[in-house]
Amino acid sequence: MADPSCDLSSCFLCRFCIPEWKTALAVHKTTMAVKKGKTLFREGDPVTGIYFIYTGAVKVHKQWTEGKELILRFAKRGDILGHRGLRDKVYPVSTTTLEDSRFCFISTEFLEATLKTNPAFTYEMLYFYADELQKAENRMRNLAHMDVKGRIAEALLQLHTFFGSDPAGTIDAKISRQDIASYAGSTYETVFKFFNELSAQGILSTEGKSLRINDPSRLRAFVTVQAPASHQ
């Protein structure tokens, strides 16, 4: 029976493969539905393949300190998961769904065949890796050289840019304060207090997990990167 969530043309995998490869994709891919709050794979699990997101949203995270996690990035429709573990054969991160989501999964063996057979797909994957590396480097710089309010403000602005806004003007994803803290390298208590401060100033409106940035320019004023100290 045909898979209603896949038209073999929309996702990252299908868009850049040659037409003749679509038949092989239809045979080798697996479509899966995953409920909110479930894990696709955990840090340290052996690599079995790579995932392409049809619908939904996911957080990509890893153990930071004892009992704490650091969210490295968020992912949504059209994004890729599991690619960072292909070389070392274990996943270096964990992935957890933020809402009910659907994925396309292909095995490591079929991915290797796809890369060898589809130069446009391989080319786009190269740029995907390069873009992710640049974003990761910027994130590490911010964590090291930005104060905590700046990191939280930057996280809110990035979430707004990444997920967009719904008709009510709120960020089009339900992200908990704990997840925002984990993304900003902060704590729940610090995020809670800063949100109250932003709300009192009219910069941010909150209702449960719904967040609306009322004044992006004033929020952006908190985002300043401290220059690293020079060593004599």
Image (cartoon, helix red, strand yellow):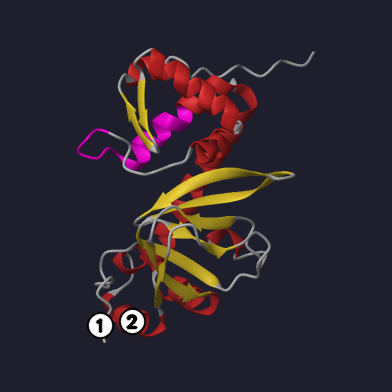
With respect to residue 45, does 21 lie above or below?
below
Which mark is on residue 2?
1
Question: What's the residue at 50%, 62% (across, down)?
Answer: 38
In the image shown, does 29 or 174 lie closer to the viewer? 174
Describe residue 44's horizontal placement relative to residue 157 as left or right: right
What secondary structure do most residues of the magenta stretch adopt? helix
Q: How would you rate the neighbour count of disc 1 (Cα within 10 Å): few for under 14, some for 14-19, many for 20 or more? A: few
Amino acid type of the residue that numbered disc 1 sits on in the rendered structure: Ala
Which secondary structure, mark 1?
A: loop
Magenta segment boundaries in residue numbering: 154-169
Measured in 3D between alpha carbons, the distance from the residue under mark 1 to the one under mark 2, in whole angstroms, is 9 Å
Front tag of 1 and 2: 1
Identity of the residue drawn at 36% across and 57% down: 56
The x, y position of residue 60, in whole percent, is: 53, 51
- Of the residues under marks 1 and 2, which one precedes in the sequence? 1
Residue 57, percent from left and from top: 40, 53
Q: Is residue 21 left or right of residue 4?
A: right
Q: Amino acid at mark 2?
A: Ala
